[in-house]
Image: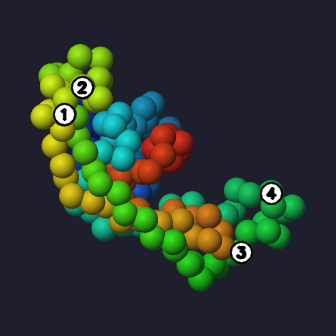
Amino acid sequence: MDYINQIILGHALNVLPQLPAESVSCVTCSPPYWSLRDYGVEPVIWDEDKEFYSESLKKFIPMNCKHDFGEYSSKLLHENRQNLDGGTLGNPQYRKNLHGFGSAKAGFCSKCGAWRGSLGLEPTFELYIK
C-alpha cells in the first residue's frame, strides 16, 4: 500500500508497528491538547517494557511487575479557544466557553512507575510528549 499523504486512523500502538520501516517522517497521535481528549478507547499500560533501561537501573525497577496502580480521577474540560482572548480562564466572561467531558480515571504503578491511562488523557505534558 502507498502511504504517501495518507491519514491513517487508529490506535498508535496498533497502527505504527504495521507501517514499513523508515517510511514515516512524522506521526501526530493526538491534537496538542494533552489531558483534554477522550477518544473512548480502553486504558492501556504505558512504559511497561523496561528493556531500554540500563542494567544498573533495572535492579531498582521490577521486571514483569504485578502492577499496583494508584487511581486518580480528574474533571475534564475543553476550552473553546476560538472564543477565548489569550486563554483568560479566570474571567467569568470566558468560563461559559468551557465544556465538561465528565471525568477520567488513570494511575501510576507504585512499584515500577508505569502509567495506565488512555491516549489523549495524559495527566502531564511530559507524558503527552513521550
Q: Do the residues under discs 1 and 3 have CB atoms within 8 angstroms?
A: no
Q: Residue at x 28, y 51 (%)?
A: 76
Find the distance from the CA under tag 4 to the CA under tag 2. Answer: 48 Å
Please name which of the two marks, 3 or 4, marks the residue nearer to the observer: 3
Taking the image as shown, residue 4 lies to the left or right of residue 18, namely left
Residue 39 in percent (x, y) is at 24, 54
| Crowd rating for badge 1 (residues with CA inside 10 Å; few <14, some 14–19, many 20+) | some
Mark 3 lies on residue: 62
On residue 91, which mark appears? 2
The residue carrying mark 4 is 54
First reached walking from the N terminus: tag 1 or tag 3: 3
Mark 1 or 3, closer to the camera: 1
Badge 1 is on which residue?
Answer: 95
Please report contact status of discs 1 and 2: CB closer than 8 Å, yes or no: yes
Q: Earlier in the sequence, mark 4 or mark 1?
A: 4
Residue type at mark 3 is Pro
128 w.r.t. 47: above or below: above
Q: CA distance from mark 4 to mark 1?
A: 47 Å
- Which one is earlier in the sequence, the residue at label 3 or at label 4? 4
Label 3 to label 2: alpha-carbon separation: 47 Å
Residue 81: horizontal and vertical position, in percent?
22, 26
Q: Is residue 106 left or right of residue 87?
A: right
Q: CA distance from mark 3 to mark 4?
A: 13 Å
